[in-house]
Image (cartoon, grey):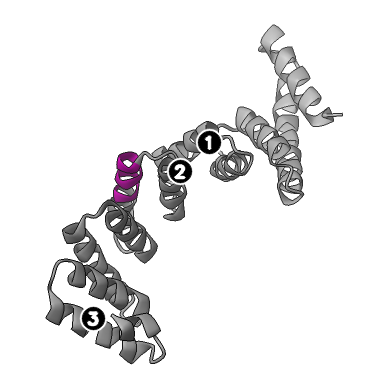
Amino acid sequence: PQALVKAYESYKKALEIEPKYEFQEEIQQNMGVIGNGLFGSGVENFNAKKYDMALIDFENVLSITPDDTLATLNAAYSAERSGNKEKAKTYYNKLITMRYKEPKIYIFLGNLYKSESDSAKALSTIQAGRTAFPADNSLVIEELNMYLYSGKDKEALESLNLAIQGDPANANLHFAQGTVYDKVNKKDLAATSYKKAIELKPDYFDAYYN
């Protein structure tokens, strides 16, 4: 059981005892093989929904190759699904520090903070994502949802305008824009947004109703 981990620990101990060990080069090569094996084991455990075991596997990979972005991402996923929010946040933040080119990590991290009722940290995370990926519409919409949830109407309208620029055929965005205008008593603008939503989605009941 855990043969790859035991092999890794043994190789590591050998090098601790004798850093200039005659088999140093062979050990380093074998470490890479072990890392690949542990990664494969992690994927298998993750697919089998054994998230705790997958997390252990990916963390062991990271002990061999600390800057492995894919192992870090999978460690974050495994930690989140196993309910270990603290480790999930640690690995998502590590990916951000590593400038990992994936906007969704900001959304996942923001949702973790939101689940802990830390709306300020959730919003600042999404805003950091917006700075890193200004053209990504999913981050714009996530920022919009947080503004709507917090009752920040002015900021919500700004995010809505950006979101609509990025996805002008999205009836839901025009409807959301209408509801915010309605809320701040700009009835004419609200009506225009609702009509646009209906134009894009002729059976949009809520838009007709509003």
Residue at 26% x, 87% y is: 195
Lower position in the chain sequence, tag 2 or tag 1: 1
Residue at 56% x, 40% y is: 72
**What's the distance in space between the residues labelled 2 and 3, CA to CA?**
31 Å
Quadrant containing the C terminus in the rendered view: bottom left
SS category of the residue bearing label 1: helix
Q: Is residue 23 visible?
A: no
Is residue 41 left or right of 146 when viewed as pictured?
right
Q: How many labels does the image show?
A: 3
- Type of the residue with mark 1: Lys
- Type of the residue with mark 2: Ser
Lower position in the chain sequence, tag 1 or tag 3: 1
Residue 85: image tag: 1
Residue 193: image tag: 3
Q: Mark 2 points at which residue?
A: 115
Whether 162 is drawn above or below 100: the answer is below
Residue at 30% x, 41% y is: 120
Residue at 71% x, 7% y is: 17
Query: Which range of residues does the magenta coloring cover?
Result: 119-127
Lower position in the chain sequence, tag 2 or tag 3: 2
**What's the distance in space between the residues labelled 1 and 3, CA to CA?**
39 Å
SS category of the residue bearing label 3: helix
User: What percent of the width, then of the height, locates residue 27?
Assistant: 74, 25
The prevailing secondary structure element of the residues shown in magenta is helix
Mark 2 vs mark 1, foreground winner is 2
Whether 112 is drawn above or below 193: the answer is above
Q: Does the magenta stretch include residue 121?
A: yes
Query: Contact (CB < 8 A) between labels 1 and 3?
Result: no
61, 53: nearer the viewer: 53
User: What percent of the width, then of the height, locates residue 40?
Assistant: 74, 45
